[in-house]
Image (spheres, helix red, strand yellow):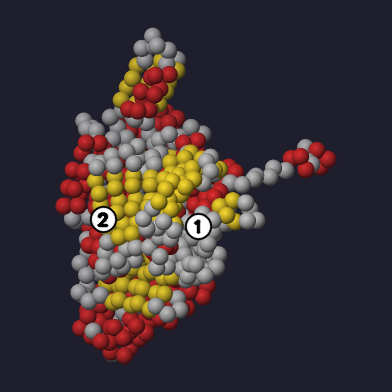
């Protein structure tokens, strides 16, 4: 196209809420399950804003029988229904049909709010095939219906009403989200429960009409109770019984609870104006800095500085479980989904508030403080022992003189990490087929023998002594724990290639647990993938089809001619596949299917891993029994 052919006629102007429907990912992060549930969080957060500003006390959330529609009710003031003269529309219609329309752009009505962008409700409307708003104000009930961002009825007076409040019914649009999406009751319960921990005295009732269940969430203990739940869910005993709790109301409202545990992980749940900041931000940075400074000051004042070992910030924070909740008037969230706080001034404010309070707590509780210092010292010694063991391993000579590579690793010839791939394969037999079917120039194969160690229940020293995991770490080259250096990573694609059966899924879960707990930067950096090997081969005439599972097999067979009699072969494992078959289906860049491993909700991921892989058998038993009816037996 020449310059003269590119004219004003080629410029598209999207009106109203059309931008939301054309690019939903810009507003809710995507059209996957996370984006689907984000619609509900937007409506619930509006109700919570009424609560935290003193206008409401209770919220009801209903999941209807189709599990694809929701109703959210609060007893707040009700969205205004009077006419905004310059627009000749009611305030309700403006809020639900116009981007950047709302009462949260000044502090006159909402001192604190999780939704300052003024787009939440209108985005939900734009992405819903049906929405109905019912408002109670001044003794009258009003109602208006909407669809895909536009009003489809006039604002109608329904009759007299007791009390005040807002009720929103909505059903997400299948044109946007597809027909397979629905709301997950467990995800909703987890999020609503967290909301009531953060707002002491708030009552949220959740009704699942399909299961005919009602849950009432209310926590008078606030975030101290929340911290106890986080510690229990992690399955690691507290280092001391004492819990540090801090609350400040003036200026920026800050509330924090902290406890050291025997876990090797650092767990911080942070919130801004009631919104979970799963990616952290400046408030978390301030909190972490405050913890380190306070502990160092306490050790100096109490004469408890350990000898013969150097403490790092990571040693001090190892094992902490904490909940941090702040309220600020103008939060600068990164993105509409509000997963990270960007306000630069917040870091110093949180630091200066928490640090002296924590130092005072430790000085007033010297016995607990001493136990914490002892725990920190042990963490430092374990780190140094781990580093010494790692250095001893790396000193061993290797033929390549590049790294101490495992003997069973079939390395690639490329030395460019960005172009290199490592396939971690289940078993020597499958490893043999993969070695023959790979592209040697950039694909490396590392076979593992049997099921690897469950790292959720093991110390770092035990993990480093495990031969299979040691081989994985050696092959990656980036180290683990305190020695981790991502710039030394030898492969920018790490692919778990396991059998397409329950044993294969179990091994993949064990590896994911290890990576999530001890190599999290590889997951957050987008380096980890799951291969999708076929479970079935379907031959029909000269055509060959590959099916991932039974559902995929049935779909393929249904598309064949009605009189077709295809030959269907089920692979018992990757070792049964010929090298050429494995190459065509799983290794070849042009035809393979890979799933990138991502973490969208660290809190939920942490809970699930602890439940499935931790020492608490009761939690695992409950998980199995709750889902027994959904399970398929793999023989």
Vertical side of 124 occupied by 629: above or below: above
Q: Determine the secondary structure under disc 1.
A: loop
Q: Residues within 10 Å of mark 2 (few under 14, many from 20)?
A: some
Q: Residue at x 25, y 75 (%)?
A: 243
Nearer to me, 407 or 543 = 543
Q: Tell me where residue 526 appears, x and y as whole percent.
A: 46, 51
Q: Determine the secondary structure under disc 2.
A: strand
Q: Residue at x 47, y 70 (%)?
A: 111
Mark 2, residue position: 216
Vertical side of 42 occupied by 273: above or below: below
Instruction: Let me know if residue 337 appears in the view.
Output: yes
- Using residue 55 as the reference point, say whether residue 298 is left or right of it: left
Mark 1, residue position: 80
- Using residue 182 as the reference point, say whether residue 241 is left or right of it: left
Nearer to me, 603 or 454 = 603
Q: Tell me where residue 203 appears, x and y as whole percent.
A: 30, 60
Q: Residue at x 50, y 57 (%)?
A: 80
Nearer to me, 606 or 159 = 159
Residues tagged 2 and 1 counted as in contact (Cβ below 8 A): no
Q: Residue at x 53, y 43 (%)?
A: 154
Q: CA distance from mark 2 to mark 1?
A: 29 Å
């Amino acid at each position: 196209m020449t310059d003269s052919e590119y004219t004003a006629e080629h410029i598209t102007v999207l009106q109203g809420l059309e931008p939301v429907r054309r690019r939903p990912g810009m507003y809710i992060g995507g059209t996957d399950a996370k984006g689907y549930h984000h619609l509900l969080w937007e409506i619930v957060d509006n109700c919570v804003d009424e609560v935290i500003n003193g206008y409401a006390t209770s919220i009801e959330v209903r999941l209807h029988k189709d599990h694809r529609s929701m109703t959210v009710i609060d007893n707040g003031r009700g969205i205004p229904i009077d006419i905004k003269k310059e627009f000749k529309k009611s305030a309700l219609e403006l809020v639900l049909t116009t981007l950047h329309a709302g009462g949260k752009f000044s502090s006159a009505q909402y001192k604190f709010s999780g939704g300052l962008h003024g787009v939440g409700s209108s985005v939900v409307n734009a992405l819903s095939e049906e929405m109905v708003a019912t408002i109670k104000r001044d003794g009258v009930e009003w109602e208006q219906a909407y669809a895909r961002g536009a009003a489809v009825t006039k604002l109608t007076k329904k009759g007299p009403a007791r009390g005040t409040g807002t009720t929103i019914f909505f059903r997400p649009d299948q044109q946007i989200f597809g027909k397979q999406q629905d709301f997950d009751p467990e995800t909703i319960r987890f999020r609503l429960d967290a909301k009531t921990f953060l707002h002491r005295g708030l009552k949220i009732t959740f009704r699942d009409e399909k299961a005919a269940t009602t849950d009432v969430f209310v926590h008078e203990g606030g975030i101290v109770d929340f911290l106890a739940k986080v510690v229990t869910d992690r399955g690691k005993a507290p280092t001391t019984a004492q819990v540090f709790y801090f609350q400040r109301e003036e200026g920026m409202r800050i509330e924090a609870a902290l406890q050291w545990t025997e876990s090797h992980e650092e767990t911080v749940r942070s919130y801004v104006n009631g919104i979970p900041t799963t990616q952290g931000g400046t408030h978390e940075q301030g909190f972490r800095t405050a913890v380190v400074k306070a502990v160092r000051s306490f050790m100096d004042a109490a004469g408890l500085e350990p000898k013969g070992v150097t403490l790092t910030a990571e040693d001090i924070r190892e094992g902490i479980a904490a909940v941090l909740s702040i309220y600020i008037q103008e939060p600068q969230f990164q993105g509409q989904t509000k997963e990270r706080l960007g306000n630069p001034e917040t870091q110093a404010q949180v630091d200066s508030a928490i640090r002296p309070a924590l130092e005072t707590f430790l000085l007033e509780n010297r016995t607990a403080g001493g136990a914490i210092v002892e725990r920190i010292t042990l963490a430092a010694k374990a780190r140094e022992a781990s580093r010494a063991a790692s250095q001893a391993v790396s000193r061993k000579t290797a033929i390549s003189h590049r790294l101490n590579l495992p003997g069973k690793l079939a390395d690639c010839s490329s030395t460019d990490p960005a172009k290199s791939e490592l396939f971690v394969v289940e078993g020597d037999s499958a490893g043999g087929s993969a070695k023959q079917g790979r592209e040697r120039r950039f694909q490396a194969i590392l076979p593992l023998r049997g099921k690897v160690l469950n790292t959720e229940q093991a110390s770092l020293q035990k993990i480093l002594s495990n031969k299979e995991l040691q081989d994985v770490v050696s092959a990656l080259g980036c180290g683990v724990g305190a020695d981790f250096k991502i710039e030394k990573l030898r492969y920018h694609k790490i692919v778990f290639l396991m059998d397409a059966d329950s044993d294969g899924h179990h091994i993949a879960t064990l590896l994911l647990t290890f990576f999530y707990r001890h190599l999290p930067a590889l997951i957050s950096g987008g380096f980890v993938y799951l291969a999708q090997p076929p479970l079935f081969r379907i031959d029909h005439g000269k055509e060959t089809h590959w099916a991932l599972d039974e559902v995929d097999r049935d779909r393929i067979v249904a598309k064949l001619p009605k009189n077709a009699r295809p030959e269907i072969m089920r692979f018992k494992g990757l070792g049964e596949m010929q090298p050429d078959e494995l190459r065509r289906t799983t290794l070849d860049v042009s035809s393979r299917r890979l799933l990138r491993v991502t973490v969208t909700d660290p809190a939920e991921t942490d809970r699930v891993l602890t439940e499935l892989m931790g020492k608490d058998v009761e939690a695992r038993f409950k998980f199995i029994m709750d889902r027994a009816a959904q399970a398929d037996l793999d023989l």
